[in-house]
Amino acid sequence: MKDISKKIKPLADRVLIREDEASGEKKTSGGIIIPVTASEDKGGKRGEVIAVGPGRIEDGKAVPLSVKPGDSVLFQWGDKVRIDDEDYYIVRESEILAVLK
């Protein structure tokens, strides 16, 4: 696996996440592809934290992020970016719903 964190560094309270393949579209045994939009569950996506920014400034003090690279997270929204033929999401820490254990 390539170390993508050397190519991109999120700013402030942003986090770079690679979405889990399993949470994307699904393919039936007959070869029919079921897109994510057809799913009834409109909840968050699962992914792995790849890189984190330094944190946000609040009342003149630095507030570090509570997630770290390697964490499995449930997130929503985010801007999709393509780096080296792979898709990633850049999200604010507040868009991360939970750290999965």
Image: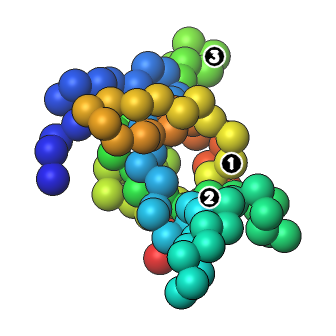
Q: Kindly report the distance in space between the C-alpha atoms of the residues bearing marks 1 and 3.
A: 27 Å
Question: Label 2's element?
Answer: strand
The residue labelled by disc 1 is 76
Residue 59's disc number: 3
Q: Residues within 10 Å of mark 3 (few under 14, many from 20)?
A: few
Residue farthest along the front direction in this orientation: 30
Residue 46's disc number: none
Question: Label 3's element?
Answer: loop
Residue farthest along the right direction in this orientation: 40
Sequence-earlier tag: 2 or 3: 2
**Which is in the foreground here, disc 1 or disc 3?**
1
Between 53 and 38, the one nearer to me in the picture: 38
Sequence-earlier tag: 2 or 1: 2
The residue labelled by disc 2 is 45
Residue 59, by quadrant, is top right
Q: Kindly report the distance in space between the C-alpha atoms of the residues bearing marks 2 and 3.
A: 32 Å
Image point (15%, 53%), residue name: 1
Between 66 and 24, the one nearer to me in the picture: 24
Q: Residue flagged by tag 1: what amino acid is it?
A: Gln
